[in-house]
Amino acid sequence: MTGGPGAKDTARALSDDTRAREQPLFGLEQEERRQLLAWVGENLTEVRQTADGKRPVYWVLWTGLAVGLAAYVGGYLIKSSTTAEFLGLVGDLLYTFGWALWTGVVVVVFLQIIPEVKRRQYKAALDAYEATLREQARAGGDLASPDRQPRSDQPPAQ
C-alpha cells in the first residue's frame, strides 16, 4: 500500500496538514493559538461570513454612507452660516467631500452589491435545479446522466 501511485500524494498531504497545524498563526504562541482556534470554533458561522468577504464590504459601505452624509450636512451648515472666507472654504470642502463620499457609496451599491446579490440568487436557483435533476436521475436509475460516473471497480462502457 505504501508503494502505490497515491502514496507520495497522501504522505505530502499529511505532512502539509501537520505543518499547517504546527505553523504559528499571526505570530502567536501555542497557548494563544489554541485559544484563538477555540474562539474560531465557537464563532464559526460569523468567522465564515467574515472570511467570505461580504461583511467587511458592507461595514465599509455603511461607514462611508454615514460619514459622507454627516460631512455633507456639516459642510452645508458651515457653508451657509458663515461669511468668513476661510470657514466658507472649509465648509465648501467638507460639503463636497461628503457629497462625493455618500454618492460614491450609492453608486457602488447599484453597480456592485445589488448585481452580486442577484447573481447569488440565480446561482442558488441553478444549484437547486441541478440537484433536483441529479436526484431524479438517481431515483430513476438513469445511466445516461452526465453526472453519473462509472465505479472504479467496473470497466468503462464501450
Image (cartoon, grey):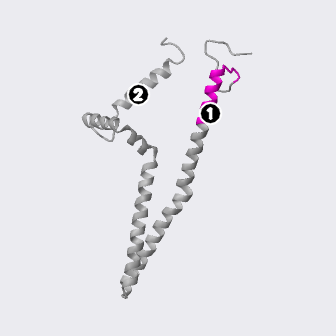
| The residue stretch that appears in magenta | 128-144
Q: Is residue 102 visible?
A: yes
Residue visible at 47% across and 21% down?
10
Q: Residue 44: where, in percent of width, then height? A: 37, 37
Left or right of 86? Residue 115 is right
Does the magenta portion include 9?
no
Left or right of 66? Residue 32 is left
**Of the numbered discs in the image, which one, if any, rests on residue 130?**
1
Label 1 and label 2: CA atoms lie apart by 33 Å
Residue visible at 43% across and 63% down?
65
Q: Dot 2: what SS?
A: helix
Q: Residue 67: where, in percent of width, then height? A: 39, 65
139 or 61, which lies in front? 139
Name, please, the residue furthest toward the right. 158
* Mark 2 residue type: Asp
Q: Dot 1: what SS?
A: helix
Q: Residue 23: where, in percent of width, then height? A: 35, 33
Residue visible at 46% across and 66% down?
102
87 or 67, which lies in front? 67
Q: Is residue 148 visible?
A: no
Does the magenta portion include 143?
yes
Residue visible at 62% across and 35% down?
129
Q: Which residue is mark 2?
A: 17
Neighbours of disc 2 within 10 Å: few (<14), some (14-19), many (20+): few
Judge depth for marks 1 and 2 and give the one in front: 1
8 in relation to 1, above or below:
below
